Image (spheres, grey):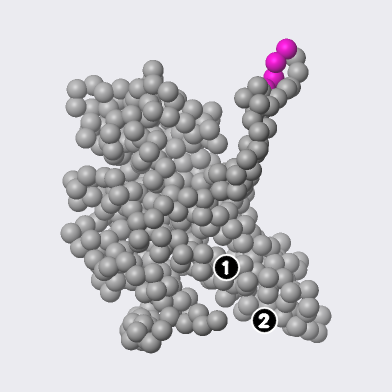
Amino acid sequence: MDLSYGPEYDDFRAEVREFCRNHRPAEHRSRGIPGVTERPSPEVLAWQAKLIEHGYAARTIPREYGGYGAKPDIIENRIIQEEFLAAGLPLGLSNQGISMLVPTLLEVGTAEQCTTYIRPTIYGEMIWCQGYSEPGAGSDLASLRTRAELDGDEWIINGQKIWTSSAHVADMCFILVRTEPEAPKHHGISYLLMPMDRPGIDVRPLVTMTGDATFNEVFLADVRIPAKNIVGARGQGWHVANVTLKYERGMLGNAGQGQSGIKGLVELLQEETAGSARAMDLDHYRDRLLKLQGRTLANKYHGMRLLSQSINGEQTGVEGLITKLSATELAYDIYSLAVDVLGETGTLYDGSPYQAERDWQKSLLGCFTGIIGGGSANIQRNIIAERGLGLPREPRVRFDSGRWELSPSASNKGGN
């Protein structure tokens, strides 16, 4: 089997490789993640601008919105990832604004919204958070109760959001609100763009087990925003939300992250010793590594297939869920092997002089976010099984007359 990309891409690979040799970002080590846990530094912003200028970030974003304006080409995208990974260079910013909101606006937003928001977002100047989950509406997101009422030319928003990543550093929030309370729950939702500096917004950070305040609670009391800050039609926010979720799963399931993890893992196994032997020379470690490398390649080529479908205007269906599920669980297994290889030093954390240069333990703890966020792994499996494989629906239970029992709708459903 020949998995090479063909001689027609050799010149492009040489161009990318030359860029990687001649350009390197200024040192900008950070405890957090730029655009997610903290504001991007000037060095990060400068590197992002250079990547866009040369077409290695925002590559297919139209020029009128600040992007490079290239035609979609999955092979070129793959070559860029491969060469940057080989050179050890960061591929630029990836956050909720760049990876989720921007493609949503390009698909269903207005020209005015694209002009206003895309350029500052892709350059890292405007940071976004996602106002989806609520205390009573997580897995069943359509049960959300945060409401917005139209008052003249303004929306008035009241309610609460939780697990809001980046809210403490964000300039804007794309938020789901209930605007038609009498409509069925999936049809009474609207998708609004809310500035985070408006009176009535209270952001309270939630510190995770990594020690970072990645998530937040957000309380909204009579927050006023312009009526024009709605994406799609009023009451049709569920459709827009699912467009965003499609891109969120693509971000969480990015195969490049797995390849970066594998590269670092191989280097770790070559450097670490167990007794007098290199970790790489021990069968049980090498066997685990080999399986992880196979899964990483499977994710890579599955991701390319999905990109092909997207470019050709084909619906991806549950294939996108498979990408997110597989990639996030792969990340956990990669980081778990690294911590095992490190032995007792794999338990050290947050500034120990004996801690590994690459913080594998923090990566292991942080990767649970991807497994749970964007639809938990268990929910992804149910959707894949029921919608993709045609398996019977998971039994639904209810509490009635002091006991748990199968709901009539669940017990009457047969398999396919």
Could you say which disc has been placed on residue 298 in the image? 1
Q: Tell me if residue 118 is in the magenta stretch.
A: no
Identify residue type, mark 2: Glu
Identify residue type, mark 1: Ala
Left or right: 249, with 25 as reference point: right
Where residue 382 sits, quadrant-wise, is: top right
Quick check: 124 above or below 220?
Answer: below
Crowdedness of circle 2 by 10 Å Cα count: few (<14), some, many (20+)? few
Q: Residue at x 41, y 60 (%)?
A: 309
Q: Residue at x 62, y 67 (%)?
A: 295
Quick check: 224 above or below 128?
Answer: above
Could you say which disc has been placed on residue 152 in the image? none
Crowdedness of circle 1 by 10 Å Cα count: few (<14), some, many (20+)? some
Q: Going by the picture, which residue comes out furthest to the top? A: 401
Which residues make up the magenta segment?
397-401
Q: Which residue was labeled with disc 2?
A: 271
Where residue 276 sits, quadrant-wise, is: bottom right
* Labels 1 & 2 near each other (Cβ < 8 A): no
**Of helix, strand and loop, which mostly describes the magenta segment?**
strand
Q: Tell me if residue 399 is in the magenta stretch.
A: yes
Q: How far across and how far down the image is residue 265, in percent?
A: 63, 73
